[in-house]
Image: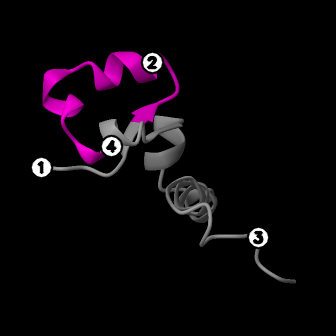
Amino acid sequence: MAPDVILSDVNGGPKREQVFSIPALSATPAAANHALVVLDGAYMIGFGPRTAEAVRDLAEALYPDEVGTPAN
């Protein structure tokens, strides 16, 4: 696997340097770009009324230049 981004939980998740010091991750494109997205895990997998908001937050974290605030 060659992930472009590593997704981690904000609640007690490892720090960036800990994540990318793991041998299995240190040679990935994510490590080369220090691409770590940290979000609340329960928020991301809740599948409730906030699901659309969670999807948008993840999209903005992954694609900050492509995802913007929608026009009213």
Which one is closest to the eye, mark 4 or mark 3?
Answer: 4
Q: Residue at label 4?
A: 30
Do callouts 2 and 1 mark residues in contact (Cβ within 8 Å)? Answer: no
Q: Is residue 28 or residue 50 the one in the foreground?
A: 28
Magenta residues span 8-29
Q: Which residue is mark 3?
A: 69
Residue drawn at the location 31% of the way across and 25% of the way down: 20
Q: Of 14 and 22, which appears nearest the observer?
A: 22
User: Per the image, is 24 magenta?
Assistant: yes
Image-based side of 29 in relation to 24, left or right: right
| Residue underneath mark 1 | 1
Q: Position of residue 54 (x, y in %)?
A: 57, 55
Residue type pointed to by label 1? Met
Q: Position of residue 5 (x, y in %)?
A: 36, 47
Give the CA separation, mark 2 to mark 1.
21 Å
Is 47 displayed left or right of 57 in the figure?
Answer: left
The numbered disc on residue 15 is 2
Q: Residues within 10 Å of mark 4 (few under 14, many from 20)?
A: some
Pointers 2 and 4 in contact (CB under 8 A)?
Answer: no
**Amino acid under disc 3:** Thr
Which residue type does callout 4 highlight?
Ala
Q: Residue at x 71, y 70 (%)?
A: 68
| Identity of the residue furthest to the bottom in this view | 72
The residue drawn where x is 40% and y is 42% is 33
Specify which label sits upstream in the sequence, 3 or 2.
2
Name which of mark 2 and mark 4 comes first in the sequence.
Answer: 2
Of callouts 4 and 1, the N-terminal one: 1
Percent x, y of residue 14: 40, 18
Q: CA distance from mark 3 to mark 1?
A: 32 Å
Q: Alpha carbon of mark 4 to alpha carbon of mark 3: how far?
A: 26 Å
Q: Residues within 10 Å of mark 2 (few under 14, many from 20)?
A: few
